[in-house]
Each structure stands twice: as C-alpha cells, then as structure tokens.
Image (cartoon, rainbow, N blue to C red):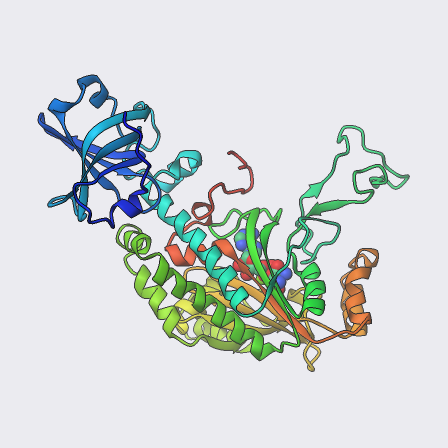
C-alpha cells in the first residue's frame, strides 16, 4: 500500500480539495452495501462524525472485503470526493484498503443500543462507541475550560499531595496507604497498630481533598487552584458517588462570602458556555440520543442568575411543601439535619427551577474549617445545588481565627498532632480566605445529560468494582 501521511477524520471532513488522495485510519462503525459497492462508516475518535468510505467491490479482493466487519481497524487510501448521500460534504472513494486489525463477532460493542450497565462491564471497549467518545471529548474540553478560566484570572495551578496523614473532611472515609505486611502487624498493649516501621513511619491515606494544603498555597501565592484525583471510601452506591473522583479546588486569600458565591457562579457558567461553544457536535449527538432537553438546559444555566438562599430559608420552604401536601419526601427534615439529595433536588428542580447557592449551614453538619457566623450556630458554607445533580460544589469561607479554629478541632476530637502545620497559617500572618471544591464528574454529568456518574469517567471505581 502506498505510504501517505494520515489525515484525521475531523480534518478530512472539512476539506474541499476534491480529487486529492488522502489516507485515513480508524475503526469501522458500520458496513452496508450491495453486490457492486460497499459503504463503510469509519471513525477515528477525533470527532463524533464518521467519514464514508466507498469501495467498488470489483476493485478489491473478496476475502479482504469480508474482513471489514464492525470494530475492525482499517487504513484507507482514497480520493476525496464530494458526497451526495452520506450526510457529510465529502466521502472517500477507496483506492487501497488495508485491514490493520481484525474484529470478530464476539466484539462486545458490535450491537447498537446496548444498555449502559452492559457497557460498564465492558468499560475497556465502550470508549469506542459514539456515546462514550462524545463524553470523553467533552471531559477533555471541560478540563481545558477549567485551566483556562483560572489561568486567565491569575490563579496558580498548585499541586497538593495524593498521600496524606490528615483527613480534611473529618469523615473518616479514607483509603489507607501502607507497605506493611497485613498478616504480621505490630500492635501495642492496647491492640493499636504501630506504624513506626511503615513506609512513612505513621498512618497515611489517599487524600479526600487538597484543600488544607491548598490553603497553604493561597495564603502565600494569593490565589491557587488544585485539579487532581481525590478518594473517598464511603460506601455509597449511588449514581452520584465515586470512590475515586477528580476535584477542582480554588482557594483565595482575602475573599469574602459574597465574592465566593460570585466566583462559583461565574466559574460554572464559564464551563457550561465553553461546552456549548467547543463541543457542539458531541452535544448535538447527546441531545438527540440521550437527553432531548440537554442543550436547552445548558443554555438556561448560562443565562439565569443562581438563587442565593440560606439553609434556614431552604428548610422553611421544604417544611412548607410538606405541610401543604405539595410534596412527600422519603427522608425527614428538620433544622440541624443534613439535606438529602431529594430535598436539594426539590428546591432546584421544582421550587426555584434554577441552580441554588445554599449558605450558612448548621455547624454540626459541616467541616471544622468553616468560618462560624456571629450567631454561633451557623457556618459560612456556600454549596451550589444543581438540577439533575444535587450538590455540585461544596465551599466555604474559612475560619481564620486561631482560637475559634482550635475550638472546632477540639470539639470534633480531631487529632491535633497531625494539624500543626495547618494551624500555623492562623498563627503566622493569618488572613481571611475562602474556597470551594467542584466535583469534576458531577460537572460532566450535568454537561452530558448522563444519569450515572460511572458513565462519565473512563474507568469508574466504586464499592466492589476496580476492574480495568
Ligand atoms: O463537599 P465536599 O466534600 O467538599 C470538600 O471536599 C471541600 N474540601 C472542598 C473545598 O472547599 N475545597 O466535596 C466537594 C465536591 C462536592 O460538592 C461534589 O461535587 C464532589 O466534590 N464530591 C464527589 N463527587 C463524586 N463522588 C464522590 N464520592 C464525591 N464526594 C464529593
Ligand atoms: Mg459537601
């Protein structure tokens, strides 16, 4: 076969220099045709669109043509021609075809319309489907949006450790990291494990959040953001929880609660607008195949002002909805308790029909680092609640007062000896500061219209699943 430099399909489809010979490589989506001519839809992942290869049967070896099955990998040299019937402006009149990789009929993605559950079991191959190709390209574009947003605003990308000795959220949901022989653990007289001989000489885990180290960065560089994997060993088998997920955590010195809410809102709108501008073809596909209201929902988020509501006001609305018989919930609510996802979604999807930034939560349900309000009962949290998703951002102003922070640490029995370095920010030139964490996969869920968080990350980690 003649060697011609490969052109990506996304670029071939834009060309108008009909008559030129090009080379494309990719995987067969479908093959159809007659005794005289074969039409092969080829995709190389550069775009949701396929290029149509037209093969005159008389010009090719019959055995080779039989090898062109769904999923097979081809290299094609052919002439770029104007297309009349393929739905694209151009197609390729094949001159030479080489089958680079055969694909038998046990190829799991061969049939159309497989369930997402089935695809999850074949997550190593689902990336080759239209839907997962679209999701992964959108995921990439969202990562670019995030870096661009912060870079344009003078934030520094700050790398916080994955292995840590502290539990930022204090929820005790950490995966331990050890090189110790689990069959031969040394214990003291109380039965507690002795970590002296472990790799780090102390108990360590995978981080649940980069925030604490992020605060060290912000109180030196002014404004930073992290963007990395975080890990939670919470046994939540829900469509919105992963054991390994990516989080974006900006942290900003001298920022107050209103400015924090402004930043949260501006940030999400920027990302959604970016998707509308950079991922048109993939969004149109998802809008057609997965969720008919997707593009309208994305546009409406970009155009609406988010509701800003205190937790106390939120509880009142929920209580009124129950009292008036307008709504029944599975879980009870009362002031002081955590909102369940059904409560959050009622507020966002039914009551306001817009994203809500909820603020000023009871101390007891929030993390130790949040700034306590003057009432002594509530904290300056600022969570963003989204349609279809529930909580997409968790954020707060941080307690900058050493004594107040110490008090929270003590009442929560957080081991002090692991926190000395964090407390030093409040000891040496303490400053007001604030930040938030956005769950990357929850953003991708919203932007793609997918229903299950396991379908917006290439290789999901959830309880009892760590395949691939
Ligand atoms: O609300 P969270 O726990 O807040 C923090 O970790 C703070 N340290 C963030 C900060 O202020 N810097 O988590 C933040 C976000 C949630 O709003 C949610 O979007 C996502 O992270 N998240 C999860 N996403 C997927 N799977 C899970 N198990 C998640 N837990 C939290
Ligand atoms: Mg939270």
Residue that extends furthest to the bottom in the rendered view of this protein: 374
Q: Quadrant of residue 261?
A: bottom right
In which of the image's four quarters is ligand 1 placed?
bottom right
Residue that sits furthest to the top in the current view: 63
What residue is rendered at 32% in x and 55% in y?
283
Task: Give the residue displayed 20% in from the left and 40% down from the top.
Answer: 20
Q: Residue at x 76, y 28 (%)?
A: 183
The answer to whether residue 391 is seen in the rendering is no
Q: Is residue 336 rendered to the left or right of residue 11?
A: right
* Left-right relation of 267 to 21: right
Along the viewing direction, whichever of 346 and 465 lies nearer the viewer: 465
The spot of residue 120 in percent (x, y) is 42, 38
| Residue 11 location (% of width, % of height) | 29, 47
Q: Is residue 358 above or below residue 458?
A: below
**In this orientation, which residue lies closer to the viewer: 96 or 138?**
96
Q: Quadrant of residue 103?
A: top left
Residue at figure coordinates x 20%, y 32% from the top left: 31
Q: In this rendering, is residue 87 above or below 394?
A: above
Q: Is residue 303 left or right of residue 382?
A: left
Quadrant containing the N terminus is top left
From the viewer's perspective, is residue 66 above or below residue 50? Answer: above
**Vertical position of residue 348 compared to residue 87: above or below:** below
Q: Position of residue 301 (x, y in %)?
A: 39, 69
Where in the figure is residue 397, as x and y percent of width and height?
64, 73
For the image shown, how many numbered marks are present on the structure? Answer: 0
- Can residue 98 be seen here? The reply is yes
* Residue most extreme to the right: 189
């Amino acid at each position: 076969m003649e060697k011609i430099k490969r052109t990506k399909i996304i670029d071939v489809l834009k060309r108008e220099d009909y008559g030129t010979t090009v080379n494309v490589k990719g995987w067969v989506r479908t093959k159809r045709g007659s005794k005289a001519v074969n039409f092969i839809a080829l995709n190389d992942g550069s775009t949701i669109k396929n290029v149509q290869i037209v093969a005159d049967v008389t010009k090719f070896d019959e055995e080779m043509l039989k090898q062109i099955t769904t999923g097979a990998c081809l290299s094609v040299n052919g002439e770029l021609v104007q297309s009349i019937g393929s739905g694209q402006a151009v197609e390729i009149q094949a001159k030479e075809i080489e089958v680079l990789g055969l694909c038998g009929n046990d190829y799991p993605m061969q049939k159309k319309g497989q369930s997402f559950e089935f695809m999850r079991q074949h997550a190593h191959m689902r990336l080759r489907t239209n839907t997962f190709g679209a999701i992964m390209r959108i995921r990439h574009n969202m990562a670019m949006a995030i870096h661009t947003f912060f870079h344009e605003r003078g934030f520094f990308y700050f790398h916080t450790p994955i292995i840590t000795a502290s539990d930022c959220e204090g929820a005790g949901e950490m995966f331990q990291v050890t090189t110790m022989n689990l069959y031969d653990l040394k214990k003291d007289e109380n039965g507690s494990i002795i970590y002296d001989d472990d790799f780090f000489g102390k108990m360590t885990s995978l981080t649940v959040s980069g925030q604490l180290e992020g605060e060290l960065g912000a109180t030196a560089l002014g404004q930073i953001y992290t963007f990395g994997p975080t890990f939670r060993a919470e046994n939540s088998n829900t469509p919105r929880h992963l054991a390994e997920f990516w989080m974006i955590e900006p942290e900003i010195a001298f920022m107050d609660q209103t400015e924090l809410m402004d930043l949260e809102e501006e940030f999400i709108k920027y990302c959604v607008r970016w998707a509308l501008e950079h991922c048109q073809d993939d969004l149109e596909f998802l809008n057609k195949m997965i969720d008919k209201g997707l593009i309208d929902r994305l546009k409406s988020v970009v155009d609406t002002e988010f509701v800003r509501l205190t937790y106390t006001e939120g509880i009142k609305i929920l209580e009124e909805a129950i009292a008036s018989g307008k709504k029944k919930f599975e879980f009870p609510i009362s002031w002081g308790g955590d909102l369940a996802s059904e409560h959050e979604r009622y507020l966002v999807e039914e009551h306001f029909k817009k994203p809500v930034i909820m603020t000023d939560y009871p101390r007891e349900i929030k993390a130790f680092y949040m700034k306590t309000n003057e009432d002594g009962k509530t904290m300056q949290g600022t969570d963003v609640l989204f349609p279809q998703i529930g909580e997409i951002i968790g954020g707060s102003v941080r307690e900058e007062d050493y004594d107040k922070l110490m008090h929270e640490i003590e009442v929560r029995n957080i081991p002090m000896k692991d926190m000395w370095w964090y407390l030093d920010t409040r000891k040496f030139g303490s400053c007001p500061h604030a930040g938030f964490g956005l769950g990357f996969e929850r953003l991708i869920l919203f932007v793609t219209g997918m229903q299950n968080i396991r379908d917006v990350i290439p290789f999901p980690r959830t309880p009892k699943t760590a395949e691939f």
